[in-house]
Amino acid sequence: MTINNPFLRRLWHIVKNKYVAATILFVLLITLTDNNIFVTMRLRGELSEVREEKERLINEMRHDSTHLEVLRGDAEAMERYGREVYYLRATDEDVYVFEK
C-alpha cells in the first residue's frame, strides 16, 4: 500500500501501532454501542426529572388530601369551595364573575 500524501502516510504509521489501534477501537466501542456513555448520561438526567416530578406529585397529593378532609368535615367550607371553584349558586342568587 503506497500512500502519496505525507499526512496520511504519517497517520497510517501511527494507526498501525497495535496499542493505538486498540485504543481507537475501544473508544469507538464505548461511544457507539447501545450502552454508551451519552445514553447513560441522558437516562440519568431523565431519571432525575422523574424523581423530582414524583416528589412534586406526592406533595400535591398530601395537600389535596388535607384539603379534602377539611371539605368533608365542614359544610360551610364545602359551600365556599363550590361557589369559588364551580360558580355554584343558590336558587335565588345570581353569579357574576370578574376576571382580571
Image (cartoon, rainbow, N blue to C red):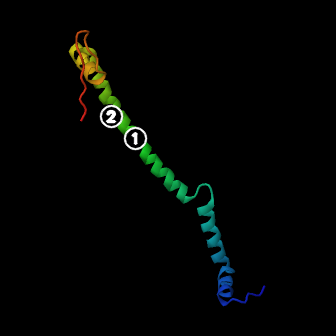
Toward the left, the furthest residue is 76
Q: Nearer the viewer, residue 65 or 14?
A: 65
Could you tell me which quadrant the N terminus lies in? bottom right
Q: Which label belongs to residue 22?
A: none
Which residue is at a point 41% across and 42% down the rendered structure image? 51
- Reply above or below: 20 against 91: below
Near mark 1 (Cα within 10 A), the count class, few <14, some 14-19 or many ≥20, is few
The part of the image, by quadrant, that contains residue 95 is top left
Left or right: 12 as drawn, with respect to 61: right
Toward the top, the furthest residue is 91
The part of the image, by quadrant, that contains residue 34 is bottom right
The secondary structure type at the circle numbered 2 is helix
Which residue is at a point 69% across and 89% down the rendered structure image? 5
- Reply above or below: 4 against 74: below
Left or right: 4 as drawn, with respect to 74: right
Q: Which residue is mark 2?
A: 59
- Distance from disc 1 to disc 2, alpha carbons, whole Å, reads 10 Å
Q: Amino acid at mark 2?
A: Asn
Which residue is at a point 23% across and 29% down the rendered structure image? 98
Residue 11 pos. (x, y %): 65, 83
The part of the image, by quadrant, that contains residue 7 is bottom right
Q: Amino acid at mark 1?
A: Glu
Q: Nearer the viewer, residue 83 or 48?
A: 83
Q: Which residue is mark 1?
A: 53
Residue 83 pos. (x, y %): 26, 20
The secondary structure type at the circle numbered 1 is helix
Which residue is at a point 67% across and 85% down the rendered structure image? 8
> Upstream in the sequence, badge 1 or badge 2?
1
